[in-house]
Image (cartoon, helix red, strand yellow):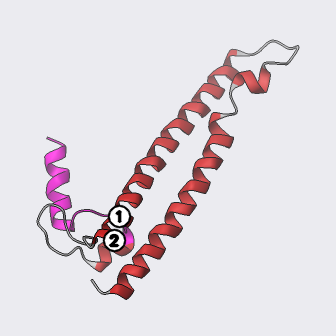
Amino acid sequence: MKKERLEYYKMILTDLKNSILEDLDSIEDQHIHHSSAKEYGDSAYPIHLADIADSLTEAELGFKLKNSEEIILAAIDAALKRIEEGTYGICQDCGARISDERLEVMPYAVRCITCKSVYEKNKTK
């Protein structure tokens, strides 16, 4: 892959990484740190069970979102490392070049679309 194209993908990946890092902070603030103890713990009024359940559901959603974002963040870091190593854009399964169309949609992709299809079919078995 040409150096200009690699720089382009490096910029895309870096921007995406920064966006996810901001999202992680937001997820923690909005979902995880707003537990029932913080919202209702100092209140003189009794805590309703529905409020506790709502708080727990919100925290669980936050943890799931955070986990998903951390997985993508790790994939982005791995893609940035592949750029530095000179292996970016090469399918880890067949060694073929990953299409620009695929990298535009998923710049941290490790498989070409054909190998990704095979991988997903085998994964569900």
Give the numbered dot on residue 81: 1
Q: Foreground: 123 or 107? A: 107
Q: Where is the N terminus found, in terms of image quarters?
A: bottom left
For the residue labelled by badge 2, is the local secondary structure a helix, a strand or a loop?
Answer: helix
Q: Is residue 116 above or below residue 60?
A: below
Q: Is residue 52 above or below residue 64?
A: above
Which circle marks residue 102 in the picture?
none
- For the view shown, which residue lies furthest in the front direction? 85
CA gap, disc 1 to disc 2?
5 Å
Q: Residue at horizontal 48%, vertical 49%? A: 69
Question: Around disc 1, counting alpha carbons within 10 Å, would you say few (fewer than 14), some (14 to 19), or many (20 or more)?
Answer: some
Residue at position x 68%, y 27% in the image: 35
Q: Which residue is mark 2?
A: 83
Q: Position of residue 9 (x, y in %)?
A: 40, 76
Closest to the observer: 90 or 123?
90
Q: Does residue 90 show up magenta in the picture?
A: no
Q: Nearer the viewer, residue 54 or 71?
A: 71
Q: Is residue 13 left or right of residue 43?
A: left
* Residue 66 vertical placement versus 76 (above, below): above
How far across and down, in percent of the image, does residue 62 sit?
Answer: 56, 38
Residue placed at 65% from the left, 27% from the top? 55
Marks 1/2 in contact by CB < 8 Å: the verdict is: yes
Tell me which segment is drawn in magenta: 105-125
Residue type marked 1 = Lys
